[in-house]
Image (tube, rainbow, N blue to C red):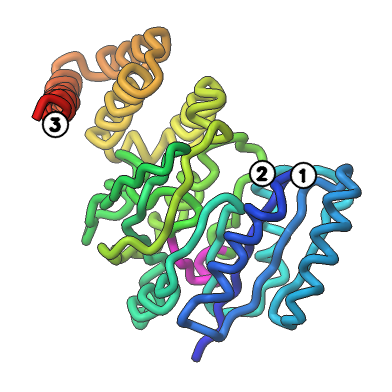
Amino acid sequence: MDLISVVITTYNRPIKVIKRALDSVLQQSYKNIEVFLVNDSPLNIELSNSIEKWIESYKDDRIKYIIHEKNMGACQARNTGAERANGMYIAFLDDDDEWLPNKLSKQIQCMSNSQIGLVYCSSFIVRENGIKKLHVPKNVSHDFEKEILCDNFVGSTSFPLLRLKAFKECGMFDTKLVSCQDYDMWIRILKKYKAILVEEPLCNYYLSNDSVFKKNSSKYMDGDLYILEKYHNDFEKYQDSYLYHLNNMALNALLMNHDCKMYFLYKAKAISYKPFNKYNYMLFFIKGIKKANKLVGRIKSNTD
């Protein structure tokens, strides 16, 4: 059995939340793992000491506890764990998310081909009121670079299993980014490697007020604008991907966050780039119809 390194990053999170994440790793059906819990909130000395004592209570040599000397951000915290990893594969888990028991065993089965850089999965999106919604991402089987430039079909850092060699070869997480760090990483990996989807949901992704898009949409949009600039040459190569991406971000700004300013910013970029491209018009109607259908379904269910 190949060793899988797991990195859990935490910042000022209550122990009961971190415990849910860590327990979901230790309860994996795939047992050959090492776990790095990286604490990026060293100034909270009381919490840091409490976490250390709590980790010791597990009496599990597979768990290594690392405390940063100063706050360095989520990207560096993940890189800190990765730098110490000994496994052939690596997986990251945000401290407020949770894996289902067969996550690693299902994903590692797809890693037989050395050209596979990551294996992603479906997930349950769990809202603060406890309502779960199944999310099944796009199943991409070819043109990985082109497709990932359209949108982040891989999803959160908590979802994929990565080949450690691919992760390090592609430069690890970009510490200059304040959001979209996961998307940036997947782009770099899928420029060189392939991906496989496990359609079975393998993760609970908890959507809370700490989520970047909910808490600070401008930070999320700033991250995406950084992506557009960083991969300017790649978007020039895949112009349809660029236009799809711009229109998709415009709709996200409008439909998810009611941000008209960002909607017009992205639409203006798209239309000025290629005024008559199909994506400048069709995405609005497709997503608008889907949203309307969901609303009608809710109204209908409430009146039945």
- Is residue 170 positioned above or below 280 on the image? below
What residue is shown at x 26% (from left), y 33% (from top)?
239
Q: Position of residue 299 (x, y in %)?
A: 15, 23
What residue is shown at x 14% (from left), y 16% (from top)?
276
Q: Position of residue 116 (x, y in %)?
A: 37, 71
Q: Which residues are drawn in magenta? A: 160-167
Q: Which mark is residue 175?
A: 2
Image quadrant for the C terminus?
Answer: top left
Mark 3 neighbour class, 10 Å CA radius: few under 14, some 14 to 19, many 20 or more: few
Q: Tag 2's secondary structure?
A: loop
Q: Tag 1's secondary structure?
A: loop
Q: Tag 3's secondary structure?
A: helix
Mark 2 neighbour class, 10 Å CA radius: few under 14, some 14 to 19, many 20 or more: some
Instruction: Give the labeled residue for mark 1.
Output: 72
Quote the CA–CA distance across marks 1 and 3: 47 Å
Mark 2 or 1: in front is 1
- Is residue 274 positioned above or below 186 on the image? above
Query: Residue 219 or 146: which is nearer the viewer?
Result: 219
Query: Residue 90 or 67: which is nearer the viewer?
Result: 67
Q: Which mark is residue 301?
A: 3
- Is residue 64 positioned above or below 227 on the image? below
Q: Position of residue 109 (x, y in %)?
A: 35, 81
